[in-house]
Image: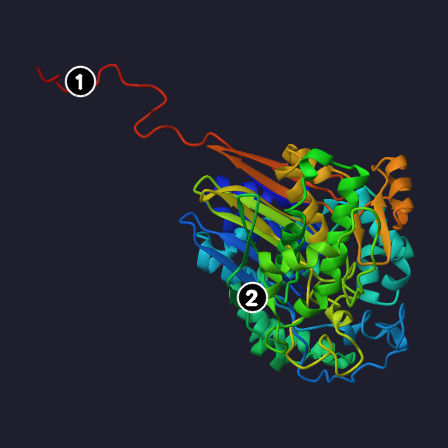
Amino acid sequence: MAVTNHPLASSAAMEMLADGGNAADATVAALFTLTVVEPMMVGIFGGGCAVIRAADGAEAVIDGLCTAPARAAPDAFTPVSDEWPDYMETVGRENRVGPRSIAVPGNLRAWCETLDRFGRLSLERVIQPAIRHAERGFPITPYLANCIAEHADDLRLDREIAALFLPGGKPLAAGELLVQSDYARTLRQIAEEGPETLYSGALGRKTAEGLREVGSFLAFEDLAGYRTKHRDPVRGSYRGYDLVGPPPPCSGGVHVVQMLNLLEAFDVRSSGFGTTQTLHLMIEAIKIAASDRRAATADPDFVDVPVDRLLSKQYGDRRRPEIDPARANAFEPQVLVNESANTTHVTVADGEGNIVTSTQTINSLFGARMVIPGTGIIPNNYMYLFDPHPGNALSLEPGKRITSGISAFIASRNGRPVFALGLPGAHRIPSCVFQAIVNLIDHGMTLQQAVEAPRVFTQGQVVEIEQGIAADVRAELAALGHDVVDVAHVAGGMCAIAFEENMMEGAACWRADGTPMGMSGGYAREGVSFWPDPTRRRAPVAE
């Protein structure tokens, strides 16, 4: 079973499984394909994190998050304000658009390490679907067409990216063919030379030189020095289910568990899904986690992160009395909110028992909103996630990893996987995973219902409520003191797989081009041929 946010990416995963590959092979093939068919969301010059459960039960996290270049000093950008909402903005938008916004990429190295450690197919094999779609082109979806149109003004600032998405000055429309010839050549080079062509070889020198000429901080030495982090997942439990997720600098693993700890003492099954009582309790839990999040979002190589304390049931018990069932409380949010909602997610499982749930991104929609000349590569704009004010936990420092709300989770019971899920959506991700877990465990929803159910989100100020929540409930929440704002959607498309006995179920939702694909059956039994030979003598039967 493979669930991704584009049908061609899910198809690429299926192709690997049909070719004898496993979940790791399928995941990497899907991610390379998404760099072609969801180019606004993810790329080899981005970052991300994968939570992996091997068939033997071993669990691992591969952290390929981006890092700050060595030449990026804490005062590299000039902030325009010390106050919100412009606290993170800088003069000339240099930290979010253009070459100075680019951090050192981790995706390509992390994907290839995932393949080497957990897969069985070659890089040359798994990259073929991506090359095919880049060379031949694919029809633009309405989702991608809307993204291009909404950001056309920024895309026009760079000649290379404008040529791709604004041919003749006009945004590509749904149904038109997008061909990426330069990127296809880059992918072929990677297939032939491996990831080192970017990190220490010819492609790396070409990209670094091109970026240096336009004023980027990134240098060839940054690429050569980049390393992934292989981490242990964070662990928690909720009503008898064991949960694993990504550790800091991803904040989602810690804070999803924290929110579940806070909620565990309340009988939300009885109060029901989407009711005023249930939503109020969940909103308050989300607000408490948001107030703590700054302590657990920074790179643990630079900041002391109190992970064990935040994960503990005792800490949940201590903070739970702060939740008043009769009114909204203010929990001082100390969280930076520059993370982009423009990400992608892949969840894949195979018949052997391997599971991969992986969230990847180039940060903002279309990343730095440029293309590295001659490569077709759209680079990240991850420098936008660092605090441009020196001296704070999330301030820019050379070599520091960016922070992320990535919340790729796997749940088990009695040692057997029950479900795996994740989604894009930046700082909204943890709250959405929290709600999906509650939907499945407390409300007994089907997997499809759980990923599509209306969502809420807050960080302590306004409460975003999807329009699927009843109007009278929104009014009652406002009467409790919540500053309610109606929104079309909270975060992006969730990709989930559920496991029951020898069955798997996949589900995606309407918030992206989400597509589950499954495969069953397989090869004939050993020794079977199409037409048995009647003249063949049978071996004598023993008396």
Query: Residue 529, located in which quarter of the rendered image?
Result: top left
Q: Earlier in the sequence, mark 2 or mark 1?
A: 2
- Contact (Cβ within 8 Å) of mark 2 with mark 1: no
Query: Which callout, 2 or 1, points to the residue nearer the camera?
Result: 2
x and y, in percent, of residue 505 in the image: 57, 34
Q: Nearer the viewer, residue 320 or 119?
A: 320
Label 2, label 1: how many angstroms apart (C-alpha)?
57 Å
**Which residue is label 2 attached to?**
109
Is residue 210 shown to the viewer in this render? yes
- How many marks can you see? 2
**Which residue is label 1 attached to?**
537
Location of the N terminus (image quadrant): top right
Location of the C terminus (image quadrant): top left
Query: Residue 167, located in which quarter of the rendered image?
Result: bottom right
Judge whether 482 appears above or below 89 on screen.
Answer: above
Helix, strand or loop at disc 1? loop
x and y, in percent, of residue 156 in the image: 88, 63
Is residue 343 shown to the viewer in this render? no
Q: Residue at x 74, y 38 (%)?
A: 453
Q: Nearer the viewer, residue 75 or 516?
A: 75
Judge whether 144 appears above or below 84 on screen.
Answer: above
Other-residue count near label 1 (Cα within 10 Å), few / some / many at <14 / 14–19 / ≥20: few
What amino acid type is highlighted by mark number 2? Arg
Judge whether 528 appears above or below 339 on screen.
Answer: above
Q: Residue at x 45, y 32 (%)?
A: 522
Helix, strand or loop at disc 2? helix
x and y, in percent, of residue 396 in the image: 73, 79
Q: Residue at x 46, y 53 (%)?
A: 119
What amino acid type is highlighted by mark number 1? Arg
Q: Nearer the viewer, residue 227 or 318?
A: 318
x and y, in percent, of residue 525 in the image: 35, 28
Q: Which mark is residue 229?
A: none
